[in-house]
């Protein structure tokens, strides 16, 4: 019964045509179902076939996700290359040196959110330096806080290997999906099938933003990835969505992810449930929520119902 249930869950994630091919291969490769094992009971044959079918479907899914991840990495690299203006070899080398002097990761977000150029320096109160080649005020050897200033400390890891379960759709968990859109999604697949894509490390950034602490939700499986919330680039159910952002590719001139989209608020309500959101440029907070009819995680400036509430597990 356990193997049958696992096979049913795996089949739920796989298109019908793929599942049919997997079924055929499972029956072809299963030695216990061959004509040479006629003495074996039909129950034993069925059990073995289901085990093999589930394994084949899981392998196919992982291969497909790996291909999607490679395509996403190519798009990220193309975006970074496009951000480089036509320049001499010396200017290209200068840009490379500029990006190497600051860090952007869940553990340390070195971009303050301010921009600059050769004639406009950074505001002194930020304790930042201007990198004209990328047009950003960055922390040279330090990390940006929620107030946009540089601090000589890294972000504080306050929770490790946690899951985010939706309150309204209690069987659904948020996870880093491999897709061309890069949007965060929800899944009902069991933990062993998600291969740590549904696990988060929570980092608290230095200082506060208008008396609100802010946090970075990093991926356990992909250490350079974090959750970001911003306006959607394409037509969608809602104008905002949550994305899995590869921070390693966000140092260039055209890298639009600012601290406001990556450093998120985590608020607890009287019921003990949490909301996750961002407040860009002192505007209304955008709260992440799950909705009926889609497994993507969207954002709303209004207070969503319990679909916008989550619980940390464990």
Image (cartoon, rainbow, N blue to C red):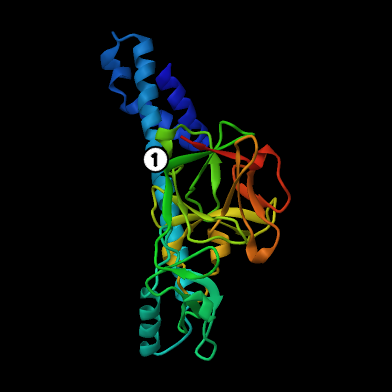
Which corner quadrant of the image does residue 209 belong to? bottom right
Q: Is residue 293 visible?
A: no
Towards the viewer: 153 or 138: 153
Q: Can you say which quadrant of the picture contains the N terminus?
A: top left
- Label 1: few (<14), some or many (≥20) within 10 Å? few
Look at the numbered disc 1 and give the secondary structure of its residue: loop
Left or right: 309 with respect to 116?
right
- Residue positioned most to the right: 302
Percent of width and height locating residue 21: 43, 34
Residue 226 in picture, x, y percent from top left: 47, 55
Q: Is residue 254 above or below residue 52?
A: below
Residue visible at 33% across and 18% down in the picture: 33
Give the image location of residue 285, x and y in percent. Answer: 67, 56
- In the displayed image of the protein, which residue is found farthest to the left? 36
Can residue 301 be seen by looking at this rendering?
yes
Above or below residue 98? Residue 281 is: above
- Res 53 → quadrant: top left
Rendered location of residue 120, percent (x, y): 54, 88
- Picture layout, residue 202 above or below residue 78: above
Front position in the image: 96 or 272? 272
Q: Nearer the viewer, residue 228 or 60?
A: 228
**Looking at the image, how many numbered discs can be counted on the residues?**
1
Label 1, on which residue? 195
Q: At 50% across and 52% down in the image, what residue appears?
A: 179
């Amino acid at each position: 019964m356990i193997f049958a249930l696992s096979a049913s869950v795996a089949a739920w994630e796989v298109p019908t045509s793929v599942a049919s091919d997997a079924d055929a291969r499972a029956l072809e490769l299963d030695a216990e179902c061959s004509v040479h094992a006629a003495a074996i009971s039909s129950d034993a044959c069925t059990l073995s076939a289901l085990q093999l079918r589930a394994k084949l479907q899981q392998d196919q899914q992982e291969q497909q996700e790996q291909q999607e991840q490679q395509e996403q990495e190519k798009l990220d690299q193309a975006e970074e290359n496009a951000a480089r203006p036509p320049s001499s070899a010396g200017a290209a080398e200068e840009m490379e040196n500029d990006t190497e002097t600051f860090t952007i990761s869940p553990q340390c977000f070195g971009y303050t959110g301010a921009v600059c150029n050769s004639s406009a320096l950074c505001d002194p109160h930020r304790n930042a330096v201007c990198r004209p080649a990328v047009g950003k005020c960055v922390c040279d050897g330090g990390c940006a806080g929620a107030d946009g200033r540089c601090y000589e400390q890294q972000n504080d890891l306050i929770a490790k290997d946690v899951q985010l379960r939706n309150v309204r759709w209690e069987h659904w968990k948020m996870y880093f999906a491999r897709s061309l859109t890069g949007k965060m999604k929800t899944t009902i697949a069991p933990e062993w099938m998600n291969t740590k894509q549904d696990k988060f490390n929570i980092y608290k950034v230095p200082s506060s933003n208008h008396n609100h602490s802010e946090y970075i939700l990093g991926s356990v499986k992909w250490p350079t990835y974090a959750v970001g919330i911003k306006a959607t680039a394409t037509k969608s159910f809602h104008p905002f969505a949550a994305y899995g952002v590869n921070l390693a590719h966000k140092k260039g001139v055209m890298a639009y992810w600012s601290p406001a989209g990556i450093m998120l608020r985590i608020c607890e309500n009287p019921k003990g449930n949490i909301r996750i959101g961002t407040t860009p440029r002192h505007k209304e907070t955008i709260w992440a929520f799950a909705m009926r009819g889609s497994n993507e995680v969207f954002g709303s400036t209004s207070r969503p119902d319990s679909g916008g509430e989550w619980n940390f597990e464990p």
